[in-house]
Image (cartoon, rainbow, N blue to C red):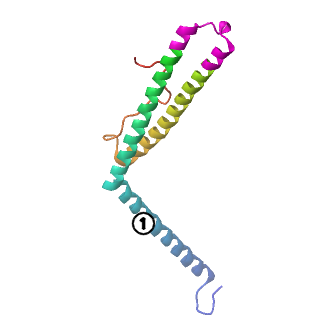
Amino acid sequence: MINKKGMSGWAVFWIIVAIIILITAIGLIGGYFKMAKNAISAENYKKNYQWFKDQESAIMQIQAQICAGQMQIADFKNTFGNDTSKWSSDTVKQYGDLTFGYNGYISKYNSLVADYNAHRSDWIRSFGIGDAPVEYAEFYPAKCNT
């Protein structure tokens, strides 16, 4: 059907669709360039570097706390023995407190490392593997290096 100005309804429809596609494409291209600019800027690089250093420091601190917890548990067992059926209720409670804290440190380690490794994957996508930070094991190893 042709309107009074001589354009069919379909022609108007396709012009509107073309305008919408053009506006969307311009928005996507602009967003891509903004994202690329942020990804490679020196300030963003420095901010990411500092985040990794802070996170690495927190991971190392938790590792030290886990190793200290392992040593405390080993000392506790050396003092009271491994047969928990011979322990008093106070000894059982103390052991429970030690293992609760130890397990909390392991949980915190796993959380920090998961976040760190996820950011590391983003880093690799943005900057390449060459400058990538070290990767940590997802779950804490069974033994500390003492």
Residue position marked by numbered label 1 in the rendering: 30
| Figure quadrant of residue 96 | top right
Query: Magenta residues, as a range?
Result: 75-94
* Image vertical order of residue 29 relative to residue 127, above or below: below
Q: Position of residue 110 (x, y in %)?
A: 51, 32
Task: Give yes or no for residue 99 being in the magenta stretch.
Answer: no
User: Residue lying farthest front?
Assistant: 90
Task: Give yes or no for residue 86 being in the magenta stretch.
Answer: yes
The residue lying at 37 percent from left, 34 percent from top is 134
The residue lying at 42 percent from left, 60 percent from top is 32
Main SS, magenta region, reads helix
The residue lying at 36 percent from left, 59 percent from top is 37
* Image vertical order of residue 72 relative to residue 14, above or below: above
| Figure quadrant of residue 3 | bottom right
**How many neighbours does mark 1 have within 10 angstroms: few (below 14), some (14-19), or many (20 or more)?**
few
The residue lying at 66 percent from left, 85 percent from top is 1
* Image vertical order of residue 123 relative to residue 1, above or below: above
Going by the image, does 124 lie left or right of 7?
left
* Image vertical order of residue 51 relative to residue 59, above or below: below
Q: Secondary structure at mark 1?
A: helix
Q: Nearer the viewer, residue 124 or 17?
A: 124
User: Type of residue at label 1?
Assistant: Gly
Q: Position of residue 75 (x, y in %)?
A: 51, 13
